[in-house]
Image (cartoon, rainbow, N blue to C red):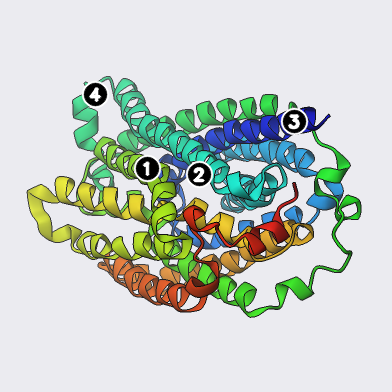
Amino acid sequence: MQDRFEKRYHDNCVIYIVIYAFIGMMTGLIFDALITFLMAVSPDIAKSMASYMGVATFAASSITILAPKTGYKKIIIFAAIITSASLAAISYVQNQWFISACLFLLMTGITLFDVILSPYIATYTAATSRTSFLTKASCASVLGTIIGTFAGGPMIVFLFSRKLNIPYNAAKILTQDISSFSFGYYSGYIDAHRIVMMVFAAASTLILIPAFSIKESVGDHDASHSKEKQSSGLPELLNKYVVLFLIYTILSRFAASLIAPYVSVYLTKIGINRAAVSMLATLQYLSALVFMASSGKLVKKIGQIYATAALCLASVPFMLILAKGHSFGSQAGFIVGTALFFRAGLANASVPIVNSLAMELVPKKSWALYASLVFMMQSTAQIFAGLFTKLYLFNNSGGYADAYYYAAIIYIAAHGMLLIVFSKKYNCAERAGCNQKHISSTTGQ
């Protein structure tokens, strides 16, 4: 009986990792092809991308609160359906209000998979293997993102060249300055984006196959079937570590929201051609995969808090290099690409560590609620980041570069606080027993 339970738990984790890889592919498309498409057809919506992400995160977090009642399987199926349908709709509608509504639904669907990641994996793993499974899931997502990003740009250029009946290299050069396009060129460029987005929308329906294979039991996530003492869950969310972790995640998400959604736009603005933009964006995701895969070893050596702070603070110098992207002339592609590689790799390597830490702060019955609360706070940060970029930062010619300065300052403040507050109690490394008193209170096994 125990072996059967363990197999079901393991299989459910593997299934989610596969699904998360598909979601990574969609994420790669969104932050590359979709954002440049929106910059062409609806610049105001594109400039507010962070706000859409924020509102969608709030919506996804609200839905995740229902997980103890509905189970994760129904939420995953719902998210897969709205993700595919909304991306397909964005591809061919022209009404700005409809595009806005579809973008909100798309981001809600995508974000749902992020919000339920930690509580879902925590439900089906022991605390000692939780970070490992979260790392595998994050790596799968990044691998999918690499595929989505790498495929998007070259596919667009290829389709663009076919529509104009010109060589691929000629089309690639033309995409260096889309502002000079004639109506015919512009129409072909937009149509190429539409086709690529429809292809990805169709591919995203494959998520439903593994989603229907998840095997749930009511006791997996319903606190009423747990041995834990029943409560509203609120007392566990009022201690100082829980509150300060929320402040940390707000600062981190605000900083990331100033730069992450606009990487492709910034690279285009400093004169890098469309295919090269996709290649550079792909390299930053590849770096995230490489660094993320090795982050577990760093945790074992110096502990999870020190590892998180070290990785993120090490990314700051590369942000400062990126802010000077315009000044590198013909070497911009190489220098900016290298800086992107290390910034993305170092910063994203901490993601599974932070996700695991969040589940250590509260008991099992509060996992879904706290994960939702974390993402709600992040959504608030994203909304304000979107308003900040739209109303102030991106209204001047150097705004996209200045965003890296702001992000660097906030990163330093956030991770300084993380070190001061959490290092004494939660800097657990596996070699030191990883604070078993915290682990035993959170594991559902």
Tag 2 secondary structure: helix
Question: What number is the disc on residue 135?
Answer: 2
Question: What number is the disc on residue 8?
Answer: 3
Ranked by sequence position, the earlier of labels 1 and 2 is 2
At 50% from the left and 36% from the top, the residue drawn is 140
Question: What number is the disc on residue 45?
Answer: none
Q: Residue flagged by tag 2: what amino acid is it?
A: Thr
Ranked by sequence position, the earlier of labels 3 and 2 is 3
Q: Which residue is mark 4?
A: 168
Q: Residue flagged by tag 4: what amino acid is it?
A: Tyr
Label 3 to label 2: alpha-carbon separation: 20 Å
Mark 2 nearby-residue class (10 Å; few <14, some 14–19, many ≥20): many
Dot in front, 1 or 2: 2
Asked which quadrant contains residue 366, the reply is bottom right
Label 4 to label 3: alpha-carbon separation: 49 Å
Mark 3 nearby-residue class (10 Å; few <14, some 14–19, many ≥20): some
Tag 4 secondary structure: helix
Question: What number is the disc on residue 285?
Answer: 1
Dot in front, 3 or 1: 3
Vertical placement of residue 154 versus 290, above or below: above
Circles 4 and 3, Cβ within 8 Å, touching? The answer is: no
In-image side of 223 versus 40 (left or right):
right
Q: Position of residue 72 (x, y in %)?
A: 76, 43
Q: Position of residue 398 (x, y in %)?
A: 25, 68
Mark 4 nearby-residue class (10 Å; few <14, some 14–19, many ≥20): some
Question: Outermost residue, front direction?
Answer: 432
Tag 1 secondary structure: helix
Q: Position of residue 230 (x, y in %)?
A: 89, 64
At 63% from the left and 72% from the top, the residue drawn is 242
Q: Residue flagged by tag 1: what amino acid is it?
A: Tyr
